[in-house]
Image: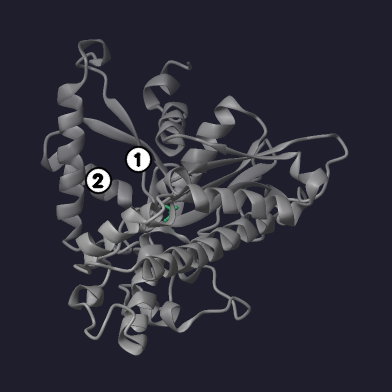
Amino acid sequence: MSGSSDDLFDYIVEKLANFVAEEEQRFHHPADRQRELGFTFSFPVMQTSINTGTIIRWTKGFSIDDAVGQDVVAELTKALKRKGVEMRVAALVNDTIGTLAGGRYTNKDVAVAVILGTGTNAAYVERAQAIPKWHGPLPQSGEMVINMEWGNFRCSHLPLTEYDHSLDIESLNPGEQIFEKLTSGMYLGEILRRVLLRLAEEASFFGDEVPPKLKSPMILRTPDMSAMHQDASSDLRVVGSKLKDIFEISNSSLKTRRVVVELCNIIATRGARLAAAGILGVLKKMGRDTLQEDGEKTVIAMDGGLYEHYTEYRECLESTLNELLGEETAKSIQVEHSNDGSGIGAALLAASNSSFLRERSL
Ligand code: GLC
């Protein structure tokens, strides 16, 4: 996550080579035919064609300075050459775009894709004419997809707490990805740690001493927070054992554990409600936040570990979306989990830009 560009792409190629080596016989390619790859790259890119684009900046804790401004596909292609792996990158795809393409392939009502995982982002289908940035020829369909990079949204109406500010300042990308820092999996556990630390320091929440481990950044991961939040045992056993395993806090009282669960709830609820507000914003932009006269449905393809595994977060997001849309409109909007939609979508886009298939007009 913090080495050189060559280290990163060599690592990816090494994993690719292992994958190819383990492929079943029936997937082996004839010697004269190059393998073609769909490359899901889940970071902000200035995309200049279906298989070229330069890295704008890193997010989610990555920090590989010499890669910024480089063409991702050219870097990967150089690494493929260095390692002697025969492969052509046929499509460079953000995970939101992959999820949109994968979802749309099986269901034509999919018009929005949202990722809620380590990071967060959304993509949607826009009328090409409504895109002032686009100066090229209009596509035949009249539509284009937009990767919003909504994780980088910030606005003076978005209240930030002192915990958000300190998390941001101490992050690898201060001032950037503010919406992502309020809503996504990489940060929710860290917000909780900061609140617990302050309680320990200022209210002796865990006794006279501040448990030293509470001061370690990023030590509390969101899956652990989710496990504490979901603890249904009468003595909040899971909360007790997480506090012990992660922070070496033993013998926490039931009262303390209850407060921890309540804090999980506050932090997850804020994140989920903001994510739902983001989705409503996209639907509004598309004119789909009200009942459609033709009865058309809108499906939102959703992927990412946070949405998939954090039940309270998911349920809160869905109920907030219904609340914002109102009962009637909510019936025409559907959120669908698309498991590894981004990988499948990238493969489909690679197939549609395959030089092998094009040469044979398939
Ligand atoms: C980060 C990236 C974005 C990606 C999202 C979800 O926000 O900048 O490109 O789509 O994470 O993985």
Number of numbered discs visible in the structure rendering: 2
Pick the front one: 271 or 200: 200
Q: With respect to residue 208, does 251 lie above or below?
A: above
Q: Position of residue 172 (x, y in %)?
A: 30, 73
Residue bearing mark 2:
76
Cα gap from disc 2 to disc 1, whole angstroms = 9 Å
Disc 2 vs disc 1: which is toward the camera? 1
Tell me where residue 82 appears, x and y as whole percent.
12, 42
In the rendered image, which residue does mark 1 sit on?
39
Decide if residue 160 is in sight here.
yes
- Label 2: few (<14), some (14–19) or many (≥20) C-alpha neighbours in 10 Å: many
Q: Which residue reaches farthest top? A: 26
| Quadrant position of residue 202 | bottom left
Residue occupying the point 25% across, 74% down = 214
User: Which x, y percent locates residue 349?
Assistant: 46, 33
Q: Viewed as shown, does residue 12 lie left or right of 101?
A: left
Image mark for residue 304? none
Specify the quarter for ligand 1. Answer: bottom left
Q: Is residue 146 visible?
A: no
The amino acid marked with disc number 2 is Leu
Tell me if mark 1 has few (under 14), some (14-19) or many (20+) residues whose alpha carbon lies within 10 angstroms of its own: many
Nearer to the camera, 136 or 116: 116
Q: Residue at x 61, y 59 (%)?
A: 278
Residue drawn at point x = 24 percent, y = 42 percent: 77
Name the amino acid, label 1: Phe
Kindly indicate whether the residue at mark 1 contacts the one at mark 2 (C-beta within 8 angstroms): yes
Q: Secondary structure at mark 2?
A: helix
Quick one: SS at disc 1? Answer: strand
Image quadrant occupied by the N terminus: bottom left
